[in-house]
Image (spheres, rainbow, N blue to C red):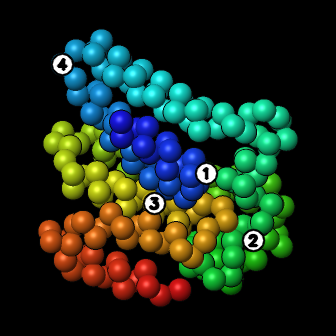
Amino acid sequence: MGSILYCMSFCFKQMALYYAPAFFFFLLALSLQKKTWSQSILSVANLGATVILSTMACLLPFSLSLDSIRHVVTRVFPFSRGLFEDKVANFWCVSGFLFKWHLKFPSALLLKFSLVLTVASLIPNGFLVLTHHGLSLETFLLSLTTSSLGFFLFSYQVHEKTIIFVILPLVFLCKRHPMFVSIMSYIASFR
């Protein structure tokens, strides 16, 4: 049910993609902790089928024409807008003051740079979740935070409002880590 609801949220607003790696790695880790390998494989297959079918159901109304599908894809992934907007404090904008990315590289190459850096920023999160033996709500919330932070810092065409996706899971950890949550909240409020 959680996978269905997550897919619906992603299909409603693409910024939910920021949480996708956290959901993927956490649910994969839970599936791999089953008693037998056959149970683990069945659990992973069920999750995969759920994600694929629920996403297809959400996109079904747009599948009547190739033009409709193309329009959905360009709205979800707005690569034509450029690397960044000037008001976002992510890696591209901050380093852009010294190194004019958009003047030195074509957009297609910047898209690849962005993809590589974003994926590289998500690998440690996935590794830690998959090798963590006591999966908990705190682990999941920290995974949501680091996943969304990786997207915010390195992905292509980031909006300033997406910092909220980084702070939201942290709010639930305020009681356990008040100083860390406070500092991150203050940092996020500057742009």
Question: Of marks 4 and 3, which one's residue comes earlier in the chain?
Answer: 4
Question: Of marks 2 and 1, which one's residue comes earlier in the chain?
Answer: 2
Residue underneath mark 4: 35
In front: mark 3 or mark 2?
3
Quarter residue 169 falls in: bottom left
Question: Of marks 4 and 2, which one's residue comes earlier in the chain?
Answer: 4
- Classify 10 Å Cα crowding around label 2: few (below 14), some (14-19), many (20 and above): some
Q: Secondary structure at mark 2?
A: helix
Q: Residue at x 21, y 51 (%)?
A: 137
Q: Residue at x 23, y 28 (%)?
A: 33
- Measure the C-alpha gap from mark 4 to mark 3: 31 Å
Q: Position of residue 16 (x, y in %)?
A: 50, 54
What amino acid is at disc 2? Trp
Residue 101 numbered mark, or none: 2
Q: Position of residue 99 (x, y in %)?
A: 71, 77
Residue underneath mark 1: 116
Kindly check if marks 1 and 3 are in contact, taking CB atoms under 8 A apart as contact: no
Residue 148 numbered mark, or none: 3
